[in-house]
Image: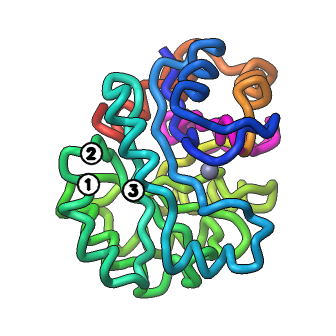
C-alpha cells in the first residue's frame, strides 16, 4: 500500500500534456500508488506577470481538487488551500469543504505574503481545530521549518505537516530541531535529495514522515520512489512512511 501525501491535479504534466484526473490515475496505477492527497495548482502559467496577484486574489484551483475527489472518492482525497489574508475565503471554509472529501487545510506563506510564525495564519489553524484536520504548510525559503515550528508550538492540539521538509539540506537540520521540540510536527518528503530523507528519518524517526511525490506536475513517481530504494530503510520504516502515518494523519 502506498499513499502519496502530495499529488497535484490540473496544470500541465511534465511532458506538456494536460494533467486531467484520468492522467493522474493512470500515473498512480503505473507506479502502484493506491491513494493520493490532492493539492490544487496555481492559476498557471507561472510565467504570467500577474501570477502572484492571481494566487493572492483568485486563489488556487481548489475546484479541480473537489471534482477529482468526487470522481474517485475511494482513492483521492482533497487539500483545501486557503489564503488567510482573504476574509471571504476564510469565512467560506466550513461550507466549502463540507462533503468535498477534504482531509486537510493548506497555507502557502510566501505566495500569500506572510510569515508562518506571525498571527496571520492563526485563523486557519483555528479552522483546523474546528474541523479536526491537520494543517499542511509549504516550506522552503521564506517559510523555514523553525518558523513553522514556532506556530506549531502555539497549537499543540493540531498536527502540522511541513511540506517538502524545508526543500533544502540546511533546512533538514532545522527539521531535526523542530521535531525534538514539537511532537505535533510531521514531514513530507517530495523534491528532496535522498540524503535529506535519510538524515531526517535516521535522527527524527520514521513515525514523523509521509511520502509525497509532487507528481505529476512538479516531479514524478519515477524520480521520487527510487529515492527510498537507495537509502536503506527496512520494511517497517517503509510501511510507516508509505502509508501508515498518512492514514492516521489524514484520517483515511
Ligand atoms: Zn506541490
Q: Secondary structure at mark 3?
A: strand
**Residue that appears at 50% across and 80% down:** 57
In the image, residue 178 lies at what x, y percent? 55, 62
Q: Residues within 10 Å of mark 3 (few under 14, many from 20)?
A: many
Residue 244 visible: yes
Residues marked 3 and 1 touching at CB (< 8 Å)? yes
Q: Secondary structure at mark 2?
A: loop
Q: Residues within 10 Å of mark 1 (few under 14, many from 20)?
A: some
Which residue is labeled 3 in the image? 80
Residues marked 2 and 1 touching at CB (< 8 Å)? yes
Magenta region: which residues?
191-217
Of the two numbered discs 3 and 1 on the same chain, state the one appearing first in sequence: 3
In the image, residue 86 lies at what x, y percent? 40, 82
Residue 81 drawn above or below residue 98: below
Q: Secondary structure at mark 1?
A: helix
Q: Is 19 or 248 nearer to us in this picture?
A: 19
Q: Residues within 10 Å of mark 2 (few under 14, many from 20)?
A: many
- Report if residue 202 lies within the magenta region: yes
Q: Is 98 or 151 nearer to us in this picture?
A: 98
The reply, left or right, for residue 180 in relation to residue 18 is left
Q: CA distance from mark 2 to mark 1?
A: 5 Å
The reply, left or right, for residue 120 in relation to residue 46 is left
Viewer-side label of 3, 2: 2
Which residue is labeled 1 in the image? 97
Q: CA distance from mark 3 to mark 2?
A: 10 Å
Find residue 141 and report its image quarter: bottom right
Which residue is labeled 2 in the image? 100
Amino acid at each position: 500500500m502506498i499513499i502519496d501525501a502530495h499529488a497535484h491535479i490540473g496544470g500541465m504534466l511534465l511532458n506538456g500534456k494536460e494533467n486531467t484526473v484520468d492522467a493522474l490515475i493512470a500515473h498512480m496505477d503505473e507506479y502502484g500508488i493506491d491513494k493520493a492527497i490532492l493539492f490544487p495548482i496555481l492559476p498557471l502559467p507561472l510565467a504570467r506577470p500577474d501570477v502572484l496577484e492571481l494566487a493572492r486574489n483568485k486563489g488556487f484551483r481548489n475546484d479541480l481538487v473537489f471534482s477529482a475527489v468526487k470522481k474517485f472518492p475511494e482513492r483521492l482525497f482533497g487539500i483545501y488551500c486557503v489564503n488567510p489574508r482573504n476574509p471571504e475565503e476564510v469565512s467560506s471554509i466550513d461550507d466549502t469543504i463540507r462533503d468535498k472529501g477534504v482531509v486537510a487545510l493548506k497555507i502557502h506563506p510566501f505566495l500569500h505574503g506572510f510569515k508562518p510564525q506571525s498571527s496571520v495564519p492563526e485563523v486557519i489553524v483555528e479552522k483546523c481545530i474546528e474541523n479536526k484536520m491537520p494543517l499542511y504548510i509549504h516550506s522552503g525559503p521564506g517559510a523555514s521549518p523553525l518558523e513553522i515550528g514556532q506556530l506549531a508550538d502555539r497549537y499543540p492540539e493540531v498536527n502540522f505537516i511541513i511540506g517538502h521538509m524545508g526543500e533544502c539540506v540546511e533546512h533538514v537540520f532545522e527539521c531535526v530541531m523542530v521535531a525534538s521540540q514539537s511532537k505535533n510536527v510531521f514531514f513530507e518528503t517530495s523534491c528532496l535529495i535522498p540524503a535529506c530523507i535519510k538524515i531526517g528519518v535516521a535522527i527524527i524517526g520514521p513515525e514523523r514522515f509521509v511520502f509525497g511525490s509532487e507528481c505529476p506536475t512538479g516531479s514524478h513517481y519515477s524520480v521520487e520512489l527510487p529515492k527510498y530504494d537507495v537509502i536503506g530503510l527496512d520494511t517497517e520504516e517503509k510501511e510507516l512512511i508509505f502509508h501508515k502515518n498518512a492514514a492516521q494523519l489524514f484520517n483515511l
